[in-house]
Image (cartoon, rainbow, N blue to C red):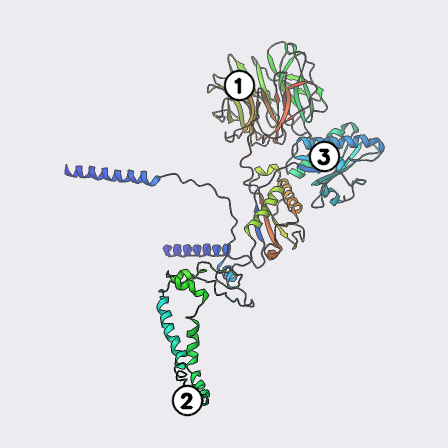
Amino acid sequence: MTDNNFMFNRRRLLVGAGAGAVAALAPHPAGAALRVEINQGNVQPMPIALPDFLAGAPSETDIARNVTGVISNNLQRSGLFAPINPQAFTEKITNSDAVPRFPDWQVINAQALVTGRITRQGDGRLKAEFRLWDVFAGEQRDGKQYFTSPDNWRRIAHIISDQIYQVLTGEKGYFDSRVVFIDESGPKDRRVKRLAIMDQDGAGVRYLTRGDDLVLTPRFNPSTQEITYMSYGQGDPRVYLLNIETGQREIVGNFPGMTFAPRFSPDGQRVILSLQQGSNANLFVMDLRSKATTRLTDTPAIDTGPCYSPDGKSICFESDRGGTQQIYVMSATGGPAQRISFGEGHHSTPVWSPRGDYIAFTGQARGGFSIGILKPDGSGERVLTEGFHNEGPTFAPNGRVLMFFRDPGQGPSLFTIDITGRNELKVPTPSLASDPAWSPLLS
Amino acid sequence: MEMRTASVISVGLHAAVLLWAVVSFTGKTFETTPPESLPVDLVSDKDFSELTKGVKEAPKLEVPKPLVEKIAEPKPADTPAPKVVEKAEVKPTAPKTADPTPAPKPDPIADKIKKADEPKQEAKNDQPLPPKKPEKKQPKFDADKIAALLDKRDPTRNAATGDTLSNAPSMGLSTGNASKLTQSEIDALRARLYALWSPPVGAQDADGIQIAIRIRFRRDGTLEIGPQVLTSGSSPLFIAMRDTAVRAVLIGQPYTMLRPDHYDDWKEIDFVFDTKQMFQDIPVRIPTR
């Protein structure tokens, strides 16, 4: 009986499968469309037209032009957009709310068009509004307005840039973010190192320390405007916390000995760091509220450069426990660690992408230093840039771009590179600069 | 003891056979270079028969004789020489039957009598004539047949077009070619869109996003109505990718590589945009110092 049932079911199944096959093979209904697969493309910077934003009054003309300039510069530096020379424009935008004459923009091959207006409100604030148009589809893709104080126009430009970037690429932008770095000035033997902060495009540099103490490895708190760094003061090098807004400074923990290589947990509630013990170094984590410290590793080796995964569940760090500096991954609570870097030479300064998909590192092989990425399981290792000296990668908030510093011999400066290895650009800084750390998005 | 030797031999032989099988059957690893994918349309029996049966109203094709549908079967070579002899024999019979009668020309009386009889004779001759005529034609100089007469080889060679199948445009032949969009036209169309489509870089991390767009074309290769997106999604990446695909299709017009004579085949096309294979080998940049 059961057998019969089984047979019956089986047959029915087979019949069902047969019917499915017949259905799949059945001819298209009469007049059905031909199907053509497009599985290759040609990734190119998108031509975008950015006519100067209109000004509500003549006094706002400069701000309007500057806002447009910052947006244009941001998009161009991303490598994904190619702003069109305004001299090619045939339509003069006189009303940022009116539908543009799309054929005029199609002629110059603008695929996207941004129109906008800056007006001063009665209360003294600025109103910035923009519309993003898809030129060939002939449609508006986005439109937003923002209010801010006039001296904050640069942030508005960054926020609009992020909005355009997100609509056109489908990914979050990274323009409304800042970078903390070590500003270096003076002769090589008496180099003054100051902690500095700037917008990601190099504008608005502000110094956070005076340069009396040596500062190293600043790192952003992912959730607040706070940074942690290591400083040589009078005594041992210590890890400090600094509030950017208030300037308030405090030492992290009460460790016996030198602490270094600090980094925040993704929730900003803990700091993970290295503590030197004799000739070894081990990883510790400190809860910033309870001040409780936990040891994570206990090896006769140098474990340093810890960095959390964005979900906070894992930690990557560098260790010479296997003989050479390599990258290891372990649970955020400690325990056994897995070596993940097996490429040529040494691997150090691991940093986990905010997207979670890659870990960037400094590679050292054949007398040169490179910046590379690999997946957290150790696969897909790629060198993005190589040379005499490259070091200290840090991810943009969207995980699409890396910033690092390069010293060709005359002193360090900052560079960005796409995680595909394309679009390497120098970041303008007032003087020599090293050890960048990218903040999360400000908004 | 014997048992043991036997089993040892047996085991040994089995092992040898197995080893041989392993060695000889493994061979080379099966290396395949992945061929470039070809679009294949599934054609059902119904489609196929519709494609080949032709149209009832279509004018019936007069199959030109020199073109053959299949290669002629070799026939036993009919030796031309005896034929000629035979025909030569037949020929004299006809005219010469008439000739002998006028032979006794010297007799004028007989001539006169004959003249009176002539209509009768002609009437009589009518009957033998029809068989004569066809026979006459064959043996006489037929320029086309001279070669055949000289050529003693197998007659199949004579069917010069025997291995040329009919390629005359026809409807309703089993080998008929229906008018169809050619592969090269589809390739040209595809190449155009490959060049124009600039998908968002983030698409490499988005497994499985496909954008299907239905386009209805005019005969001149421009779009009759706007691109109709068949797939749906709400993620920012989907929307960005959809826009890039629509933009590529819009910028690409007019699609002049599509020939108007098969307009029916391409008046409606579903494009499926897919980045799955696109980002497999991002070049690793190793700059020179």
Q: Nearer the viewer, residue B10 or B92?
A: B92
Q: Is residue B41 left or right of residue B159?
A: right
Q: Is residue B177 left or right of residue A115?
A: left
Q: Is residue B33 left or right of residue A289?
A: left
Q: Nearer the viewer, residue A433 or A84?
A: A84
In the rendered image, residue A395, in percent from the top left (x then y), is placed at: 61, 27
Locate the N terminus of chain A and report the quarter of the image it occupies: bottom left
Element on which disc 1 rests: loop
Q: Residue at x 57, y 39 (%)?
A: B206
In the rendered image, residue A60, in percent from the top left (x then y), is placed at: 82, 31
Badge 2 crowding class, 10 Å Cα cut-off, few under 14, some 14 to 19, many 20 or more, is: few
Q: Vertical placement of A348 versus B260: above or below? A: above
Q: Name, please, the residue furthest toward the left.
A: B1
| Image quadrant where residue A140 sits | top right
The reply to whether dot 3 and dot 1 touch (C-beta < 8 Å) is no
CA separation, marks 1 and 2? 133 Å
The reply to whether dot 3 and dot 2 touch (C-beta < 8 Å) is no
Check disc 3 and report the residue beneath it.
A160
Chain of the residue under label 3 = A
In the rendered image, residue A379, in percent from the top left (x then y), is placed at: 50, 31
Indicate the amino acid at tag 2: Ala
Q: Is residue A430 visible?
A: yes
Check disc 2 and report the residue beneath it.
B110
Q: Are marks 1 and 2 on the same chain?
A: no
Indicate the amino acid at tag 3: Ile
Q: Residue at x 36, y 64 (%)?
A: B77
Locate the C terminus of chain A and report the quarter of the image it occupies: top right
Q: Nearer the viewer, mark 3 or mark 1?
A: 1
Element on which disc 3 rests: helix
Q: Vertical placement of B280 versus B113: above or below? A: above
Element on which disc 2 rests: helix
CA separation, marks 3 and 1? 43 Å
